[in-house]
Amino acid sequence: MTSKLSLLAKIKKFGFNRIAIPKSVKIFGMEDALSSQEGYLTYSKKSPVRFDIPIEIGRREGVDAPIIPKLLPRMMSCMKNMKQAIIDLDDNIKDSKRQIEKDELVELETYIRSLDISGIGYTTVPQDFIFANKAVAYENAIVLTMNMDNKKVSIAPSKQTAETIWHTYDNLGIAANKIARYLRKKGFNAHASHPLGGIVLYPRLAEKAGLGGFGKSGILITPINGGTLRLAAVYTNIENLPINEGNEHGWIMEYCKTCLRCVKECPPGAIYEKPIEHETGRVTHIDNEKCFPYFGNNYGCTVCIKVCPFNYTDYHAIKEGFMKRSK
Ligand code: SF4
Ligand code: SF4
């Protein structure tokens, strides 16, 4: 019996929740344990609590999360690679290099792009961006984007959309682990962070890294992918990365006020027209209590990404038109 069949057989016998949820809880516990490790950068009092989808699916009545059997190996691979990212931290060494040469950085970026990564940004991790109870091994971050299949997003919500979501999560998680291993081979230290869940608020980290700006639905919008992407990061001890300064995508939120398509077309009406600003400075765009049941029962929904104009019109064309109208 192949491992795929045995996985399916187990899930048939015990149910998806009884296999996947305990695995997730174990991995989340391993992540939490990092926050008591010496030298790690930990969460702050202002840190948000992560919304853990597998646990929410398990604990909520009325969220059935229809399973697509052919995606189960991808889901399990995601869990395996989340766990592997933590296990691989043992391979970091005490006296590693901390400065990268220009040609090494070019080689690193060439390698990263060979893994189907569409965007690379560099930034430092503020403690407030780290989820409660989590920690990162290094303050410097290489932030990564990988695009989803636009055609499959354009028919959201559907099984095909779920396929591109899970394929992208899995491929990006594998890529993040490969990049961390590549860095270790070159003499640096690294901590890969899987796109599923994430230890840090990825959209905010990616915005800080200069990769894009926030849209009304809380997604990151980039010139390369619009909002049709997933995010991950590799934290590293390299001290001289070309860290981004400034944000040239701040206009997006102003444009959103004139668009509001995602607000109007979100099936359960979960997107706030006026985002909630917390005392901590954090901004909430989505009412999870409304989004999650629909998201869970409809293959990860994704309607807000599907309808976003940045998904089918060039970023620069939208910007030019908006700037002209704003004069
Ligand atoms: S995923 Fe679906 S339900 Fe959730 S905010 Fe987007 S459109 Fe709304
Ligand atoms: S659909 Fe419109 S309002 Fe929503 S994120 Fe995209 S541009 Fe902004």
Image (cartoon, helix red, strand yellow):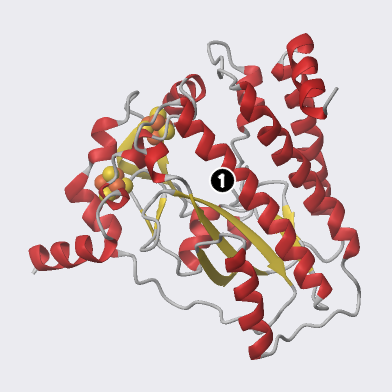
Q: Residue at x 39, y 71 (%)?
A: 247
| Quarter of the image that includes the C terminus | bottom left
| Quarter of the image that includes the N terminus | top right
Pick the front one: 63 or 182: 182
x and y, in percent, of residue 35 in the image: 79, 53
Q: Residue at x 73, y 67 (%)?
A: 138
Q: Is residue 122 visible?
A: yes
Q: Quadrant of residue 190?
A: bottom right
Q: Which residue is mark 1?
A: 168
Pick the front one: 85 or 152: 152
Instruction: Give left or right: position of 63 versus 92.
Output: left
Q: Residue at x 74, y 33 (%)?
A: 24
Q: Is residue 65 above or below residue 206?
A: above
Secondary structure under the numbered disc 1 in the rendered image: helix
x and y, in percent, of residue 217 in the image: 36, 43
Q: Is residue 32 visible?
A: no
